Amino acid sequence: MNFKKVLSVLAFTALVGAVDAQNIQLHYDFGSSMYDEYVDRPVLTSTVEMFKLDKWGNTFFFIDMDYASRGLVAGYWEIARELKFWEGAVSAHAEYNGGLTSFELPAENSYGAVSFNNAYLFGATYTYNTADFNAGYSLSAMYKYIQLSDEPHNFQLTGTWYVNFAKNNMFTFTGFADFWREKTGFGDYIFLSEPQIWLHFNKMRGVDENFNLSIGSEVELGNNFASIEGFFAIPTVAIRWDF
């Protein structure tokens, strides 16, 4: 699906509230047919997510891999740690972002690769969940160090949310919104959000509760992100399996 989550955060609360969770997703992306700047954008992206609680907080990571006809063309991952030795809704936050993408060279069947600059984030997160964990949100304020950037010292604000709704919590609406400073050819500030909607088959009448398949959609909303100047919106269709 492309640079879907380059320099972004997928929220840990988006996974099901305060329980351990792992899932794998496969997205079909429509960006290459909607924007000239993304004509070579891969149409398939797989995402693996993991969220794990412990007595000192929680750990979350995701790994994105993008696929083209020639094979795997990009990989990106983020890992985040919420740390708390105290009571309350505020935790210390530490995070790493990084990845690699390939590109075609003039020579036939020749390709090169470039790394995304390592990004290190440190700050604090406020988290709220309802008592039944059917809805919640988090807000993070972070210092962001972008290695090898001409202006490495930056900031990032992140909001995340999840809402389970309809009969037997058949649907989940979840996502994140990021706003951060990073000097690019389009300006100094970037916005990215990826709301998702999922229909869970195992919440439907007559379906085995262990049949953990979901279908859904994501819309990537960005401004001055990756290779597009200004605002853009790119939808996907997706399937997901929870473990």
Image (tube, rainbow, N blue to C red):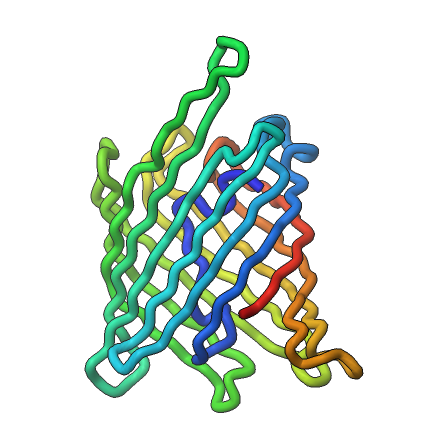
Query: On the rendered structure, is 177 left or right of 120?
Result: right
Query: On the rendered structure, is 145 left or right of 233?
Result: left
Query: On the rendered structure, is 190 left or right of 15?
Result: left
Hey, which quadrant is residue 213 in on the image? bottom right
Determine whether 190 is above or below 96 in the image: above
- List x then y, in percent, for residue 104: 50, 19
- List x then y, in percent, for residue 139: 38, 68
Determine the residue positioned at 24% across, 72% down: 83
Hey, which quadrant is residue 182 in on the image? top left
Determine whether 13 is above or below 95 in the image: below
Pick the front one: 62 or 129: 62
Pick the front one: 67 or 231: 67
Pick the front one: 112 or 195: 112
Pick the front one: 94 or 73: 73
Query: On the rendered structure, is 13 left or right of 171?
Result: left
- List x then y, in percent, for residue 110: 48, 16
Determine the residue positioned at 54% across, 55% down: 194
- List x then y, in percent, for residue 115: 34, 33
Determine the residue positioned at 62% across, 27% down: 39
How many labels sit on residues? 0
Q: Residue furthest bottom?
A: 131
Determine the residue positioned at 59% across, 33% down: 68
Hey, which quadrant is residue 1 in on the image? top right
Position of the C terminus, as image quadrant, is bottom right
Q: Residue furthest top?
A: 107
